[in-house]
Image (cartoon, rainbow, N blue to C red):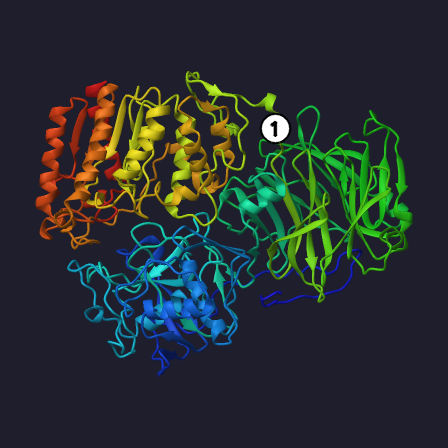
């Protein structure tokens, strides 16, 4: 079922296409309405059945004040031209349990009181609850998906094929604009029931609103999920804004309202996040949700560049399914979004299913990704339409939309090839029109042009005839089909200038959407108009484009695959890894709309839908070519990507020749993981790459990740930064003993964050990545089952990790920096720093500190035995914590922290290879405001300063 509103579609048969392209450009998001200043207009509000009715109005989301984060600026005005309902208070434990029981939802955890907000839930937990409530009330559902994935605690961590249907009259999460519209009516932190550094726990919800809106706890108590993906604001006015089309490279979501731990000053309606990056699978003990109800007409999504996206494309399968279909995670999908006229692109290896429109201002058709996966070519002309056309090539490795134009009179339907001499060329035709008339067809021609180093060579004519359906690798067969199925057949070993036979296949019956396989079989896939030869071969009647036909290298039909019920095919193209081939095509519904893209496997005639939208044209599926084992370099320092090369020492530890499970080895990521897992996947790649090169390893939380710069250290220090958001001593201990100690053979210096305020985290905790999330990720399970490769690292484990899911766009920023992530924006230390926990945790349970200290001491003892220096850094936090009684963001009390520091000092006396580097000095440090990102993290200048001091210390030890 196609839930999306089709904006416009003009239909008629041209040559062999089911519809003509829509060539109009998209309007900018501004609706040109009245200027709305700063606050929402006065809505008429009526309380009804636990929800409040809110009439249409206007609101400003975001702020122009530079004290707010970059993603909270600038102020953007949003008109809501519809009414909706919103819960008075957060969904309670009692409400959740009641609905869950009736709807047979998975349950998790226990609440002390049914009137407490349900918390520690993922975004997906919330939307499943909303769907269940809609069904129980005989409403439509606002969310669709094909498969739900749950963790060991019963929380939903991924909904494959997830889509939000704004037009559904259903229960759902409120949009960010709706939430702010309700909250800012009478924003009052005095009524937030926020405890601001006192009791640090959720309180029961109220039965009546605490301000003039009737709402409870919009500020404080539980932080709340909203519906939107995180996107950029723009200085404009938009109507019915529902966020970004997707979560981008990191899959970020939005939470609003602060929590019981937020200070009054922290609470504001513009805040959009938490301490760490929030994804759909994130959960925290202070995050809950409330529901909204109602449809959103003409919903508008906005891209980061400010363009509107009223036509959303939904990926229907995740990277794991793509691997099952193609044999690899390293696959990319490109297609034309015919609503916008732009080429869209999805890199499955990223892990997050973010679809980007990569062309702007060019009406582009027939995209094709280069053999190395780094470039994409497309043309302004398309099959069946005669006339001038231009081919452009664009980088997929750059964030820009700069296109490189082939300067020739006319060029259409590009197809990449790698010649025997290693040259990469684009084969194209100078006209893609109707090929029925032989004289007209022969009047056009097929060409090729070399493309190297981002530049075109000189075009070379290959032969007469516009054979745009493909040219075989051995250059003996070319095909075309823009009305009839034509072939150019040459003898084996002949050159393109030798004479060849131009023949017509398929008994001259109408055929189109022709594609020649590039796997050596020289099979031709095509569609027809229910002609006689097709009906004879299929043994039954069928409609136009209802069947894909496959012919062998002589034009003889060998297979036919029928479309799913209610659909026909269009835009058929082969995709291959060099050994086996599949077909990608669009599925066209009874109204002629190309609403889906599907993969068709000729091996079993299976059809798998992989994307859905309003009008999806010309899909191209790139699959990384398989590499013969003999051509793979065994050195773990060698990257499979030429751009990733760097100098490495020779491999000294043994590398095992094992037959690895390619569904597990090096796979440190899967769909639906938290941002901590995203970061850790990248850090594992760095570990395997530099295990034989690095002599310095940095371990710890985001304070390490964002503060220590490996490239800034002087020679001979070669460091990797394995810091990760929220990493406690439990994770540091696990990572050191199972990976670093075993495999970083040149280790001389281990730099560890002494984050005393994180030592409340127990080993058996969902906050411990290796105890919780890693248990469900194949690579970590595989490593553990093989004793973490203590007897030697498998050959090419780094290569497998590099190629694995989650390793592309976001990972790039860490590769050049060896794990450091820069915080450029310095917002200062915050005069009223936040405290997220009860600061007496150490007094209430001394074992938390004692167990953590023991883990740290284990590391020190091990390093001392191996003559490895341990530098324990206490990172600077806001000097204003001196006025709070808390040591830092997570406590503990200052007296407890001072006692811990004395323990560290005594430890340094006991173990000469342990050095304490206290950069906080109980708040009496010299890191100024322009060096701080927030109350607990350094920004760029601070990172430079602390790394310089570390370098000076290391130089005294070398």
Horizontal placement of 509 versus 769: left or right? Answer: right
For residue 224, above or below residue 517? below
Q: In the rendering, at what x and y percent does residue 692 appear?
A: 39, 21
- Residue 201, given in percent of the width and then of the height, sits at 22, 60
- Residue 637 visible to an observer of this rendering: no
Of residues 466 and 943, the one nearer the viewer is 943
**Left or right: where does residue 727 sit relative to residue 899?**
right
> Which residue is the site of mark 1?
627
What residue do we see at 46% from left, 47% from top?
Answer: 249
Q: Where does residue 811 sit, x and y in percent of width and height?
A: 43, 39
Residue toward you, 156 or 256: 156
Closer to us: 851 or 732: 851
Q: Image quadrant for the N terminus?
A: bottom right
Quadrant for the C terminus in the image: top left
Residue situated in front as seen by the camera: 549 or 207: 207
- Number of numbered discs on residues: 1
On screen, residue 388 above or below 64: above
Q: Residues within 10 Å of mark 1 (few under 14, many from 20)?
A: few
């Amino acid at each position: 079922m196609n839930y999306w509103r089709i904006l416009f579609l003009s239909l008629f048969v041209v040559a062999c296409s089911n519809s003509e392209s829509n060539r109009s450009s998209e309007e900018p998001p501004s609706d040109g309405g009245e200027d709305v200043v700063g606050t929402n207009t006065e809505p008429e509000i009526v309380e009804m059945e636990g929800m409040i009715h809110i009439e249409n109005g206007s609101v400003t989301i975001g702020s122009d004040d530079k004290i707010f984060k970059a993603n909270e600026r600038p102020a953007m005005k949003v008109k809501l031209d519809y009414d909706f309902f919103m819960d008075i208070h957060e969904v309670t434990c009692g409400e959740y349990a009641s609905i869950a029981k009736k709807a047979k939802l998975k349950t998790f955890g226990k609440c002390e009181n049914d009137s407490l907000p349900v918390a520690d839930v993922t975004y997906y937990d919330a939307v499943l609850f909303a769907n269940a409530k809609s069904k129980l009330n005989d409403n439509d559902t606002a969310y669709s998906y094909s498969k739900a994935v749950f963790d060991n605690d019963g929380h939903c961590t991924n909904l494959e094929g997830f889509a939000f249907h704004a037009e559904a009259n259903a229960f759902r999460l409120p949009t960010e604009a709706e939430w702010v519209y309700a909250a800012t009516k009478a924003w009052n932190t005095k009524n937030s029931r926020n405890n601001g550094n006192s009791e640090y726990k959720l309180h029961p919800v109220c039965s009546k609103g605490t301000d003039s809106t009737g709402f409870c706890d919009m500020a404080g108590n539980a932080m709340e999920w909203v519906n939107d993906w995180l996107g950029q604001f723009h200085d404009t006015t938009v109507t019915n804004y529902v966020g970004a089309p997707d979560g981008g490279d990191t899959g970020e979501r939005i939470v609003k309202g602060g929590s019981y731990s937020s200070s009054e000053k922290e609470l504001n309606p513009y805040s959009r996040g938490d301490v760490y990056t929030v994804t759909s699978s994130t959960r925290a003990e202070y995050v809950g949700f409330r529901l909204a109800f109602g449809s959103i007409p003409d919903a508008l999504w906005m891209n980061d560049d400010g363009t509107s996206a009223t036509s959303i494309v939904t990926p229907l399968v995740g990277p794991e399914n793509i691997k099952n279909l193609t044999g690899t995670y390293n696959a990319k999908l490109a297609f034309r979004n015919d609503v916008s006229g732009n080429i869209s692109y999805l890199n499955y290896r990223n892990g997050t299913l973010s679809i980007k429109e990569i062309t702007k201002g060019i009406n582009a058709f027939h995209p094709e990704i280069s053999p190395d996966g780094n470039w994409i070519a497309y043309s302004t002309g398309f099959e069946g339409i005669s006339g001038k056309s231009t081919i452009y090539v664009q980088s997929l490795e750059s964030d820009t939309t700069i296109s490189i134009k082939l300067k020739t009179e006319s060029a259409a339907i590009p197809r990449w090839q790698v010649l025997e001499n290693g040259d990469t060329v684009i084969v194209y035709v100078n006209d893609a029109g109707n090929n029925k008339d032989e004289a007209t067809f022969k009047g056009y021609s097929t060409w090729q042009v070399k493309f190297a180093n981002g530049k075109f060579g000189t075009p070379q004519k290959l032969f007469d005839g516009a054979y745009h359906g493909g040219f075989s690798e051995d250059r003996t067969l070319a095909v075309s089909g823009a009305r009839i199925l034509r072939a150019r057949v040459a003898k084996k070993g002949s050159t393109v200038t030798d004479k060849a036979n131009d023949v017509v296949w398929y008994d001259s019956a109408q055929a189109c959407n022709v594609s020649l396989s590039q796997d050596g079989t020289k099979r031709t896939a095509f569609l027809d108009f229910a002609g006689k030869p097709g009906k004879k071969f299929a043994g039954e009647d069928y409609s136009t484009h209802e069947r894909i036909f496959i012919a062998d290298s002589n034009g003889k039909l060998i297979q036919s695959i029928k479309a799913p019920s209610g659909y026909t095919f269009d835009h058929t193209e082969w995709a291959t890894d060099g050994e086996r081939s599949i077909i990608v095509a669009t599925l066209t519904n009874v109204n002629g709309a190309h609403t889906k893209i599907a993969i068709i496997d000729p091996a079993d005639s299976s059809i798998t839908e992989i994307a859905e939208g309003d009008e999806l044209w010309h899909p191209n599926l790139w699959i990384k070519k398989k590499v013969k084992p003999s051509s793979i370099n065994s050195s773990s320092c060698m990257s499979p990507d030429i751009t990733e090369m760097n100098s490495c020492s020779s491999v000294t530890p043994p590398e095992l020749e094992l037959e690895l499970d390619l569904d597990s080895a090096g796979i440190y990521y899967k769909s639906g993981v938290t941002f901590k897992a995203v970061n850790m996947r990248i850090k594992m790649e760095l570990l395997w790459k530099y295990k034989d090169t690095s002599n310095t390893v940095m371990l710890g939380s985001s304070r390490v990740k964002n503060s220590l710069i490996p490239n800034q250290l002087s020679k001979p220090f070669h460091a990797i930064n394995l810091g990760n958001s929220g990493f406690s001593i439990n994770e540091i201990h696990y990572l050191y003993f199972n990976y670093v100690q075993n495999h970083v053979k040149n280790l001389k210096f281990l730099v560890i964050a002494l984050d005393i305020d994180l030592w409340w985290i127990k080993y058996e905790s969902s906050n411990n990545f290796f105890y919780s999330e890693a248990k469900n990720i194949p690579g970590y399970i595989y490593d553990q089952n093989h004793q973490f490769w203590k007897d030697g690292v498998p050959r090419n484990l780094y290569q497998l990790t590099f190629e694995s899911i989650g390793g592309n766009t976001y990972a790039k920023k860490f590769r050049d920096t060896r794990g450091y992530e820069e915080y450029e924006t310095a917002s200062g230390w915050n005069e009223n720093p936040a405290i997220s926990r009860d600061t007496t945790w150490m007094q209430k349970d001394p074992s938390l500190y004692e167990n953590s200290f023991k883990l740290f001491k284990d590391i020190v003892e091990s390093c001392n035995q191996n003559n490895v220096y341990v530098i324990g850094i206490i990172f600077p936090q806001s000097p204003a914590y001196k006025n709070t009684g808390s040591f830092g963001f997570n406590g503990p009390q200052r007296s407890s922290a001072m006692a811990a520091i004395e323990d560290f000092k005594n430890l340094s006396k006991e173990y000469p290879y342990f050095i304490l580097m206290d950069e906080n000095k109980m708040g009496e440090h010299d890191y100024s405001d322009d060096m701080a990102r927030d109350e607990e993290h350094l920004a760029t200048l601070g990172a430079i300063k602390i790394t310089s001091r570390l370098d000076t210390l290391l130089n005294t030890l070398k």
